Image (cartoon, rainbow, N blue to C red):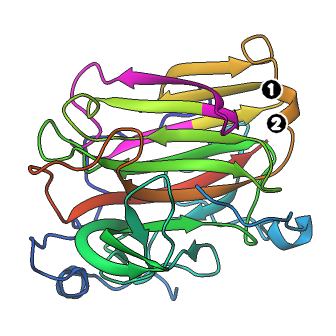
Amino acid sequence: MTGQPPPHDRPARPGRRAALLGVLGISLVTTLAATATPPRHAARTAPAGPVTPAAVRPAPPPTEPPGAHLPGWRLVWTDEFDGTAVDRSRWNVRDGEARDIDLGCNVDDPANVAVADGVLTLRVQRRVVACGSQLRQYTESYLDTIGKAAFRYGRFEVRAQAPAGPAGSQGLWPAFWLRADDAGKGEIDVVELPGGAAHHRAATQAIFYDYTPVKQDQRWPFPTGHPGDGFHTYTTEWEPGVIRWYVDGRQVWQRDRRSTPWFDEVFDKPYNLRLNVQVGGWLGAPGPATRFPADFRVDYVRVWQR
């Protein structure tokens, strides 16, 4: 590995208080207002059609935050979530979107997506809402960088805490992943963190050719602890001919031209970033014991290139 992520068992970063200490029935907005500190400075459905490289190439390079320097890599994009709201120059927040692969409604609502104390919180709530022509029983959040940033190769990293545990997390499914910017074939899952008794101890790594599906994946169980016991770092290094995955600095998986006959066909073009938490899907619906609200907390998202 080219660099070590920060330890997973410390708070979100030095000097940061934990965000979102609210309990069920206290709104996310009220909780953040009560705990926020001033910023340090002033501040799976894809639309058709490619985005022009000029529109998505990050420039100028960001200032390296502490711990972000890696020999052999240069930081080209980052969100440290140091403000008081989602940075709309970096992210789109989907709104009123009911997808057929899960049970929630993606909403652009401060009760579901907020930034405070250097942490982005994507919150799932059990709340009945009109979502397009449907009524959905849950609200959830989905951020992407379509039209804002896309990358061909790089090192992609998220430091996050999942809402997963041995009890009370069935049906919750957070993820950080990349999707082909031309809306064609290809997906790279840096990490999926499904909840529930059967899944909560493992982090999923995956690649997709298409959604027939043709895919390769694995579920890597933590030797001790689990993704919901604190902040952990999930990293994918994507280079010509090879993709490597790391959890807390430990390599856990690799795909290349030998393992994947379709590797060059789908992994030689720009990909945008996706960060979301959804309800239901392949791991099943929430059960009576699933606790809401449920928070997927993200300390940072960083992208390096050679």
Is mark 1 in CB contact (under 8 Å) with mark 2?
A: yes
Q: Where does the N terminus fall, quadrant-wise?
A: top right
Counting from the top left corner in percent of width and height, residue 179 is at 69, 50
Q: In which quarter of the image is residue 202?
A: top left
112 w.r.t. 145: above or below: below
Residue 16 can be seen, yes or no: no
For the magenta stretch, what is the residue range? 207-235
Mark 2: few/some/many CA within 10 Å (<14, 14-19, 20+): some
Q: Residue at x 37, y 64 (%)?
A: 104
Residue at left offset 72%, top offset 13%: 259
Q: What residue type is labelled 2?
A: Val
Relative side of 299 to 16, left or right: right
Q: Which of 265 and 288 is in front in this view?
A: 288
Q: In which quarter of the image is residue 32?
A: bottom left
The image shows residue 297 at horizontal and vertical percentages of 33, 59
Q: Position of 89 compared to 105: left or right?
A: right
Comparing 44 with 146, the one in front is 44
**Which residue is located at x 79 percent, y 65 percent?**
48
The quarter in which the C terminus is drawn is top right
Farthest residue toward the front? Answer: 133
Q: Which mark is residue 263?
A: 1
Q: Mark 2 points at which residue?
A: 266
Identify the mark at residue 240; answer none if there is no mark. none
Residue at mark 1 to residue at mark 2: CA–CA distance? 6 Å
